[in-house]
Structure formats: structure tokens, C-alpha cells
Amino acid sequence: MSPALRTTHHHGDRVTVSVEGSDVELLSYVYRPEAAWEAPKPYLHPIRTLSGAVVTDYRPNDHRWHKGLQMTASHLSGQNLWGGNTYVHGEGYLELPERVGSMAHLGFDELTAGEDRVTLRERLTWHPHDGELWAEETRSVEVHDVEGPGTAPGTTSASGTTSASGTTSGSGSWALTWSTSVTNRRTEPLRFGSPTTHGREMAGYTGLFWRGPRGFRGGTVLTDRDEGPEVMGRQAPWLAFSAEHDQVDGHATLVFAHAPENDHAGTAGQHPAHWFVRNDPFAAVAPSFAFHEELELAPGESLTRRYRVVVADGRWDRERISAYLKDHPW
């Protein structure tokens, strides 16, 4: 049986999710607005493994607007809902505060903690710098499949890693499902893009974005068929990032996966998605929905996507990841 989960709502600030009978707080969903220059928007930080190790970063000195795991829009019809400087072709990154927008929390329609699942459903609005309503979003964040060492279906060993001190990391894992539906409320199309669609090579970041801790620099990147730097800009149903912690012994693996209905390859007519990933000079992953080409959303239409993030102790290989995803269908 999975460990029970509990939530704590600090009204006006954040919701935390913890494991019953444990000191480990798996995540905080922070929805209070922050600095305007950083494109205020809700985010998840810290995110922790079951062993308590932190696997997200917050306001690093290279990019103050990188905050854990968050939904972003780096180029949106001339506005920047990513934060910080804006990329302009031929001029580089410029300080253009008049282009920096925001995503505002309106309220929670559901916040429930069951025996083995937490569900958070939220309403948000998207705005350019002047505050006009551009889009409405419904979002859900679910925590589920919390599995301690040795309990994961379909596995026969812990698959942990041994540190220099002789301690072995656990094999515990849990999953997060992030669902979003963004509806265009303008009278003209919303154009989702990225620095790459505006002229910068291999900088296709936009959409759901994870920033890893500083110690995750140099981590291992895998998909179902590729690995290493060549994964950038390619398509795959999932991508995994493994790295060793600072401060505490052991490794962690995060697996980012598309839901089947995302049609990430565009074969059923949806806009194709491509992975943005870096392990140098920092750790970052985004299943970008506008890497190489802009995505145009007509007035009144909705952009709907669903992703899963598996947070695991230990260094998982391709075989272990594939087995987990098979044993945990959508």
C-alpha cells in the first residue's frame, strides 16, 4: 500500500504536500505573486525525493526567474511570460520590462488529499505587461504513486547507487502529473514561440520548465533511444535526467513524460513538441511546444497538454525507466 499523503494550505501563499508519518515534504506549490521583472507565476519549489533530497533550484544567480517547475511562455505574441531579459534577433537579450507579463492565480476549484493521491485544480489568467486579459488557464497538479524502497511493481532490485562513504541511495519514487488547458481570450491569435523561433539556435525553451539544483550540472540525459547533448531539439515520448546531489549522498532521477494525447510528434495534427534540455552550464528540461516553429492559438481555442514527472531516488537506467513507465500507464 502506498503511504498516505497530506496537504497544508498556507492561504495566499502556498500548498505543501507531505508523506504521512514522515518529515519529508514532497513539494510546495507557491502561488503568491513575486517580482514583476521575473514574470510572476505559480511554481513548484522545493520538490524533494522520498529520501528528502531537493531536486529543484530557486532564483539562481544566473537566471533569477528560474523557479523550480513552472509553466512558462518565453515568447507570446511579442510578450515575455518567462521572465528577465527578452531575446531580440540581432541584438541578443535586452532589458525590456514593457514586454514582461504575468500569470495570476484566481483560485482553487479542488484541493483534496486522498489515501494515495493529492489533487490541486486551479484557475489562472495570463496577462501582458499592461495587465490586459490574454488567456484563461485551468490547471491541475496531482501527486500519486508514492512507492518506498522495494515496493515498485515490476522491479526486483533497489537499483540504488553507492556513494564514496559506503551508503546506498534508496529506490523510492513518486509521480507528479501536470495538466493544463490555456484558452485564448483575445480577438486575435496568440502566437507561442521561443528564442529559436526568433533566430537563436538551440534555445527552444517555453512551456513547462524545470530548473535543477546547481549540483546537477553535468548530469546524465536519456530518452528511449538517445542520450547526451544530441537529445536537444529532438522528439521522444520521455526524457530522463539523473545526477548526484550536493550536500547529501546519492543520486536522483527525474523522468519527464508526455501523455499519449499530447501527440508530441505531430502525427495526428497537433503542433509537434521537441525537448529542450541542458546539463551545462546548468540543469534544465522543457518539453517545448514551440521549439522550432511557432504555435498559433486562434481566438477562443484552447491549448491542452498533460505531462508526468517521476521523482526517484537513485540513478535509473533506460531499462528501469521503461519498466516503470510500462507498469504505471496513463
Image (cartoon, helix red, strand yellow):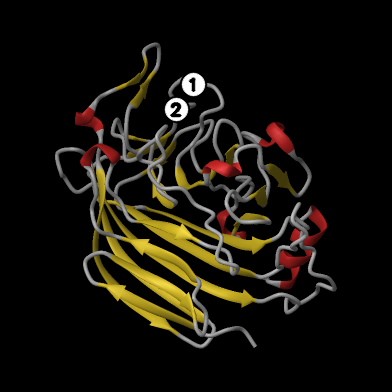
Crowd class of label 2 (few under 14; some 14 to 19; many from 20; radius 10 Å): many
* Residue displayed at 19% across by 38% down: 129
Position in image of residue 21 (x %, y %): 51, 85
Q: Quadrant of residue 304?
A: bottom left
Residue lying furthest front in this view?
165
Pointer 2: what residue?
195
- Label drawn at residue 219: none
The answer to whether residue 165 is left or right of residue 294 is: right
Image x and y of residue 41, in percent: 30, 51
Q: Is residue 52 left or right of residue 89?
A: right
Quadrant location, the N terminus: bottom right
Is disc 1 surrounded by few (<14), some (14 to 19) or many (20+) residues within 10 Å? some
- 249 shown above or below 15: above
Q: Residue at x 80, y 74 (%)?
A: 154
Question: Which residue of the protein is positioned furthest toward the top in this rendering?
Answer: 90
Q: Which residue is mark 1?
A: 200
Q: SS of the residue at dot 1?
A: loop
Residue sitting at x 81%, y 72%:
155
Dot 1 or dot 2: first in sequence order is 2
**Amino acid type for the residue under numbered disc 1:** Arg
C-beta proximity under 8 Å, tags 1 and 2: yes
Decide if residue 273 is in sight here: no
Distance between mark 1 and mark 2 Cα atoms: 5 Å
Amino acid at pointer 2 = Pro
> Within the image, what quadrant is residue 17 found in?
bottom left
Q: Which of the 4 image quarters holds residue 279?
A: top right
